[in-house]
Image (cartoon, rainbow, N blue to C red):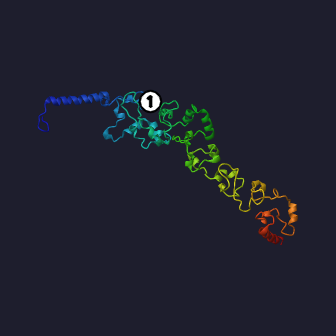
Amino acid sequence: MAHLDGTPLSRLGVALALVAVVGVVTAATVTGGGIFSPGALHDGDSTTSTLQGVTSHAGLSRQCGACHAAPWSGTRMDAQCLDCHRDVRRALSDTSTLHGHLADASACVSCHTEHRGATAGLTRVEGFGSAHGEFGFSLAAHRTTSGGTPFGCSDCHGSESFTFETTRCESCHRDYQEAFIARHVREWGSDCQSCHDGADRFTGGAFAHDTTGFVLDGGHVSTACVSCHTETRTLEGFRGRPTTCVGCHRADDEHRGEFGDDCAACHTTASWEGATMEHNDFPLDHGEDGRIACKTCHENPKDYKAYTCYNCHEHSPARVQAQHRGEVSTRNLDDCVRCHRGGDEEGGEGHERGRRRGDRDEH
């Protein structure tokens, strides 16, 4: 017998090779392939719960084929995993679970490792915190618990499927913010994630309302959020709130829309009181007392088209009727501005227009 290069093989060498092959095959058969194992399988959380006849991976230490399919079979290892972990297979179609959120949830070995010892963890979490935002909730504001210890997955996720328990937010925060949380839940409800995404933009006054396009100044500075964001329960609800005066205060408009929507033409954000306006149709300083309060002439705050001159001038309807008899129409004499457009007593040009119009009215 000879090597390929012509060197003769000794019978002893061939015999030793055969013994080695037989030994390896025998050992592999006896140990169930265990001699090829790179380390012990996980056995740290054995329970009475059984999957495929075992209570932990350690129970498969003599059944390599349960996880490792033969290379020529064409079967992927993750398929073997999901054949056992059927609860995870079901979770893949549920986006409320961790696995249902993953882009490639079937790549089990990208997060889960084995053969690192009987008590070693099965989930590799290093660096996962920085990627948590991909699941809709950043851990930026949840580095440590209220007690100062680092957050663990089980602090928020209470099941093997990592389904988020929505009550965890409220129960955890009540431990150290009881009064605040009681009021907050009363005003906004218990669905914390509808508004909070973990970025912590609202805590400690850090939220800059100016960035929303609506600057809080004047009387708005001390206004409680819930006063404006009535029935708002989601981030979209906050973004959809009106940013104009009438958008929020239309129901409070004592002018009933008669003055239009440009509230800032008369009012400031400091207060509804102290309004100023350009009274173009009639001069407010036509008398000796200078500018006068609106209610002096406009007695009905819900109808600013109605007015009276009797609250200031010392005359009565009967006296005005007598004074104007024969000059103009005696109808609608309460509408003084129809003739006295400049506020002058004699009437002037306005009086002439009113007189001519009154003459036509008589006919």
Mark 1 surroundings: few (<14), some (14-19) or many (≥20) residues within 10 A: few
Q: Quadrant of residue 176?
A: top right
In the depicted view, which residue is nearer to us: 141 or 323?
A: 323
For image coordinates 81% across by 64% down, the residue present is 345
For image coordinates 78% across by 55% down, the residue present is 296
Residue 178 seen: yes
Q: Quadrant of residue 85?
A: top left
Picture coordinates of residue 151, whole percent (x, y): 48, 33
For image coordinates 68% across by 55% down, the residue present is 266
Q: Helix, strand or loop at disc 1?
A: loop
In the depicted view, which residue is nearer to us: 108 or 236?
A: 236
- Residue that carries the numbered disc 1 in the rendered image: 50
Picture coordinates of residue 222, whole percent (x, y): 63, 43
In the depicted view, which residue is nearer to us: 188 or 207?
A: 207
Picture coordinates of residue 81, whole percent (x, y): 40, 36
Q: Amino acid at mark 1?
A: Thr
Please indicate whether residue 3 sits to the left or right of residue 311 in the image: left
Please indicate whether residue 309 sits to the left or right of residue 14 in the image: right
Name the quadrant of the N terminus: top left
252 versus 97 height, above or below: below
For image coordinates 18% across by 28% down, the residue present is 16
